[in-house]
Image: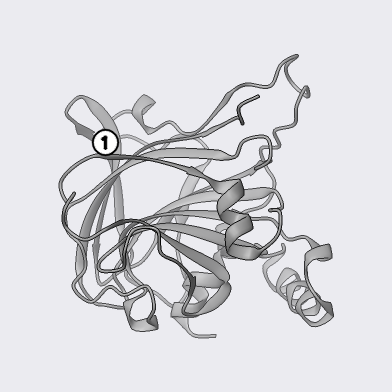
């Protein structure tokens, strides 16, 4: 398996296993309406990342994107700088997308990639992406796929995600484009921002991950297994800078 495909499909190296199970009524009499997934604004500029966030790297990609907590007009955010490199930041957690279908986040990019193209393997780079993975469910795969997942579990010590959605800041494709990743149909790409019109501006996004998964894969989603932010330029060889603000999941409206 080449490094680019490894980067895209086997984000199982993220260790996205259940470590933060959120079940209604387990810890509280009432389910919280908001899950604070990435509370970067509570951290200290120049300090350590919040608990449970850790580096995401790929064995065959030696050059890594650099991430740091910085002060941006009084708010601490994550700054990513990539130059022909790839890596991310990830948090392992389990979230029920039926209970918490809305994901919201802020991001900003310093530039878009000239060679970025969501339809091509050589263009599978983005100045910013929010990566959401979904836990393996043996009832959703056929016999041969189940054998592949079992083999992967033996190799990595856990099942890889059954699927993933990438919310991306693309270079050319229209906002709203949804396509399979050029390396695997198990990863679906959704263009949330595109082009240079909003470069240098903070943009707040809100997506219904439950409905997006149903549209992308044609079935109800399994449990969310993890969240990652990433800025990668290893395929295009370009450079990019991006900033990521807080990430939250919100309960469905009653």
Q: Is residue 110 left or right of residue 155?
A: left
Q: How many marks?
A: 1
Residue at 72% over, 64% down = 159
Q: Is residue 133 left or right of residue 154?
A: left
Question: How many other residues sit within 10 Å of disc 1, few (<14), some (14-19) or many (≥20)?
Answer: few
Residue at 70% over, 33% down = 22
- Look at the image and tell me in which quarter the N terminus lies: bottom right
Q: Position of residue 188 (x, y in %)?
A: 52, 66
Q: Is residue 167 left or right of residue 160?
A: left
Q: Quadrant of residue 144?
A: bottom right
Determine which residue is flagged by label 1: 46
- Look at the image and tell me in which quarter the C terminus lies: top right
Residue at 53% over, 59% down = 165
Task: Say above or below: 117 vs 18.
Answer: below
Residue at 61% over, 31% down = 252
Q: Report the residue that reaches farthest toward the top.
A: 29
Task: Say above or below: 200 vs 125.
Answer: above
Q: Position of residue 235 (x, y in %)?
A: 32, 78
Q: Please name the colour scheme applied to the rendered image.
A: one colour
Q: Position of residue 196 (x, y in %)?
A: 16, 57
Nearer the observer, 34 or 236 = 34
Q: Position of residue 130 (x, y in %)?
A: 43, 52
Q: Quadrant of residue 12?
A: bottom right
Task: Say above or below: 121 vs 230.
Answer: below
Mark 1, secondary structure of its residue: loop
Nearer the observer, 249 or 94 = 249
């Amino acid at each position: 398996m080449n490094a680019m495909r490894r980067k895209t499909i086997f984000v199982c190296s993220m260790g996205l296993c259940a470590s933060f199970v959120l079940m209604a009524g387990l810890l509280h009499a009432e389910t919280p309406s908001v899950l604070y997934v990435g509370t970067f604004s509570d951290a200290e500029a120049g300090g350590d990342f919040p608990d449970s966030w850790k580096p995401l790297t790929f064995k065959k990609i030696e050059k890594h994107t650099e991430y740091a907590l910085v002060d941006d007009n009084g708010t601490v955010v994550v700054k990513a700088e990539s130059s022909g490199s790839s890596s991310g930041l990830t948090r392992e957690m389990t979230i029920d997308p039926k209970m918490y279908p809305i994901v919201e986040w802020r991001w900003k990019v310093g530039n878009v990639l000239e060679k970025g193209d969501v339809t091509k393997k050589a263009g599978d780079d983005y100045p910013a992406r929010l990566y959401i993975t979904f836990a393996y469910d043996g009832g959703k795969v056929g016999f041969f796929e189940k054998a592949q997942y079992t083999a992967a579990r033996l190799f990595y010590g856990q099942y890889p995600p059954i699927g993933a959605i990438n919310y991306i800041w693309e270079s050319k494709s229209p906002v709203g484009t949804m396509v399979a990743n050029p390396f695997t149909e198990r990863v679906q790409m959704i263009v949330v921002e595109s082009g240079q019109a909003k470069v240098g501006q903070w943009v707040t996004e809100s997506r219904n991950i439950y409905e997006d998964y149903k549209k992308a894969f044609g079935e109800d989603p399994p449990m969310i297994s993890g969240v990652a932010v990433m800025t990668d330029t290893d395929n295009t060889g370009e450079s990019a800078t991006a900033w990521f603000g807080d990430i939250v999941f919100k309960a469905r409206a009653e």
